[in-house]
Amino acid sequence: MGSSELKRSKDSVSSDESARRSSFPDEVLERVLSLLKPHRDRSSVSLVCKDWYNAERWSRTHVFIGNCYSVSPEIVARRFPRIRSVTLKGKPRFSDFNLVPENWGADIHSWLVVFAAKYPFLEELRLKRMAISDESLEFLAISFPNFKALSLLSCDGFSTNGLAAIATHCKNLTELDIQENGVYDKGGSWLSCFPESFTSLEVLNFANLTSDINFDALEKLVGRCKSMRVLKLNRSVSLEQLQRLLVNAPRLAELGTGSFSQELTIREYEELESTLSNCKIMHTLSGLWDAKGIYLPTLYPACSNLTFLNLSYAALQSVELAKLLAHCPRLKRLWVLDTVEDKGLEAVGLNCPLLEELRVFPADPFDDEIVHGVTEAGFLAVSFGCPRLHYVLYFCRQMTNAAVATIVQNCPDFTHFRLCIMNPGQPDYLTNEPMDEAFGAVVKTCTKLQRLSVSGLLTDLTFEYIGRYAKNLETLSVAFAGRSDWGMQCVLGGCPKLRKLEIRDCPFGNAALLSGLEKYESMRSLWMSACNVTMNGCRLLAREMPRLNVEVMKEDGSDDTQAYKVYVYRSIAGPRRDAPPSVLTL
Amino acid sequence: MSTPLEHDYIGLAETSSMERSSDNISSSSIPSIEDKTSRTTNDTSLNLKETELRLGLPGSHSPERKLSLFGKDFETNDKTGSPLKNLVSGAKRGFSDAIDGSNGKWVFSMNGKSDVKLAKGAVLASPKGGLDSKSNSQQPRTSVSVMKEVAGVSQSPKPVQDKQNLVSPVNEHASAPAAKAQVVGWPPIRSFRKNSMASNLAKNSDEGAGCTCMYVKVSMDGAPYLRKVDLKTYNNYMEFSSALEKMFSCFTIGQCNSNGLVQDGLSESRLMDLLHGSEYVLTYEDKDGDWMLVGDVPWEMFTDSCRRLRIMKGSEAKGLAPRAMEKCKNQN
């Protein structure tokens, strides 16, 4: 750094900032800040002073936008000129459960148009709950010559034709990750659109797709992409085909199998076993649709380094799970179906001392008469055996306050506690009391708690506890709970770090809604549906807080004075202009 | 792309509830789902109706049901609005597109490969559902409920009115406390997972039920273990006996590998000789528990009444053996 450059950079700083002039030239500051990755840290840095704000914005290459309507693409492009990677989230989370109208918005296209002009060297796009059409995918594919990574999670609006466009035009693609989207699957021919010369793919996840794929094209693609490290197949891929693919990709770190239940001859079984035993560096295993117990032993040799095992599409029994887990000593994350029952979870407690995350999904969520599944006993067993557990998602049909109290005593480090007692408003099945004390124990004991989902019969007391004790809580999901406005008021009055609050089917009304006036600007969003909020309450909120967007979703035939679904979020882009007729912006 | 579900359900009698459901699924491009509904009406029609009605009738629930959702502390509050109305409006576009597709491909179309390929060389084990038999009995109802919910979700608003026709039967059977309202978006599970489990259950209910496949045990005197065959995959005694021959030839000829499993490329003619000779006789246990000689009755009657099979040593089948030889010669 010559002294002349130093002088020049100092001159370029306006005199307004002379009070706090940084002693570093901008270039040095930018270089230092470019090493800073987490977007929250970057936000903090940008608030220090004007110099730092500028250095930060010039050095930022990845932008994370948690709510696509909180800001406009033009504003983003103006502030950050050198973006190469974008993460965007769109619809409210309850859209995953069909609570948001189909044409609600969150369309990516307007963003892509701006990006094409301002970020022609864009490399990565990660979208969650956005609407994306085939035309948009094609536009993306042809507008960004350096495009490398596309990840779509819980998006909708596109078909496999859009994927074909990506495959055809993105010559430098390293990642194509299609997860849990509403994809219109027109068939597997899109895979053959990758040209023969294309060899750069490292991550391929099409587990979401349902139709048969062109296996020949897939086999060739895997064969020529020597750097492939993540491969997640869909259900149509058979065991025999899996074996053929793995022969060409022994260095896979993450594998999602297809259907794990084809009838095999002895020779095929042994071949599969031998091929899988070469996959020693695998740390993530998923897929395993329709897994039959007799074939699971082929996996054993591949499990020694496994840290994440996703069995949530394999209806295993407890014994099968126990045998498999005995070979997974390093497991940190486990997703299972409740077909494994409490006995299977006991095996988890016994075999997985390093476990940090457990998700138990229901195999039969809609049948109340199912007697099996998991109970509080399974959860308890895991908590005794896995003291490092900090993330749990647990669907069950019965729970007790005492069990939860013991669980959090065993595992006080919970950061994410999502308990879903599937029958709405169900009390402690032993004492018949509300589940208030359970969640009270959670928030009192787990001081690091960031995310909480409550369920069961809950009075306002639960929310008093949450407001008073959950000092680090950022996301709260509430359904069929509470007694009066007081509950919601407690949460809005406490919980200093609250960012996302989603409520459905609770008796919270205008008083509760309006008690959070000051709070909502420090939050990303609030969702309230099937509560007691009225249009007048929403109008008042919108009037008092001009920097909030207050949107009400109308229902056909519903009472016009009731605000049936309300979505409130802070925005510097003003009210959105692409709302459908059923969404009113107040 | 074929829809492999269909072949299992051709020709099954429809019940009245099936007809009602076919009125309400107005799209003609989901035959496999209607067929599946008819298939699963082997349960009592009352249960099926309960199941149908639990599938989120938008805006059509009765106040009593509301109470059961929120517990006894809540009054029925009309102002709160109906959670069930969400059913159609919240649909993800992907599903309706999937139904509207001309080939009728449904989001969870299944693997085209048949699970049963017993006749093709030796196999490791007979296919069995991933869920145990206890849960199999629950599945037909559940599979209908989940799939129909998906079907309902994907439709445009028009069929919402159709579905409201189902309301009156709900009230007729409202005495059943288990008829809980199927609340939209509850339990909170993403659509992809819901659909995957639906087809999972559907697959297993195929194998668990008695109508579309019929697994029976086959034992052979002197063999170290039994086999299972699906009688439905054979059309006559010829196919059946040759399949059995392939399955069991190793035990008579003694050419098993160290695991005791059948190897490829065995000579099957030797077993035929043995069967046609006095050494072995094929018998079965019928519905009444009697041991009968295979081949006396027409094939369909045999498959209906056969509970299990035993390849008996000729010496034990005293008195039957000469007839067995004759029967075999007549058939072959």
Image (spheres, rainbow, N blue to C red):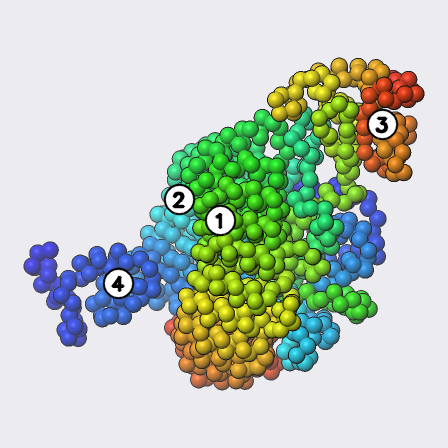
* Residue A555 in view here: no
Q: Distance between the residues labelled 3 and 4?
A: 84 Å
The quadrant in which the N terminus of chain A is found is bottom left
Task: Locate residue A361, reporting x and y percent.
Answer: 58, 55
Q: Which residue is drawn at 82% across and 46% down?
A: B12
Whether labels 4 and 1 share one chain: yes
Q: Is residue A403 left or right of residue A370?
A: left
10 Å crowding of disc 1: few (<14), some (14-19), many (20+): many
Q: Which amino acid does the dot numbered 2 rest on?
A: Thr
Q: Give percent across and percent down for residue B48.
A: 77, 58
| Mark 1–mark 3 distance (CA, rounded to whole Å) | 50 Å
| Front one among B298 and B3 | B298
Q: Could you tell whether A196 is left or right of B114 in the image? A: left
How far is mark 2 from mark 3, CA to CA?
61 Å
Identify which residue, A54 or A109, lies in the foreground.
A54
Circle 2 residue:
A174
Q: Is mark 3 on a helix, strand or loop?
A: strand
**Nearer the N terminus, badge 2 or badge 4?**
4
Task: Give the structural element (helix, strand or loop) at label 1.
Answer: loop
| Residue depicted at x 84% and y 48% | B13
Q: Which residue position holds label 4?
A: A56
Q: Distance between the residues labelled 1 and 2?
A: 33 Å
Q: Is mark 2 on a helix, strand or loop?
A: loop
Q: Which of marks 4 and 1 is nearer the N terminus?
A: 4
Name the residue tied to disc 1: A352
Q: Which chain carries label 1?
A: A
For label 2, the crowd category at 10 Å Cα-Cα, with few meaning under 14, some 14 to 19 and many 20 or more, is: many
User: Between tags 2 and 3, which lies in front?
Assistant: 3
Name the residue: 9% across, 63% down: A7
> Circle 2 marks a residue in which chain?
A
Which chain is home to disc 3? B
User: What is the chain letter for disc 4?
Assistant: A
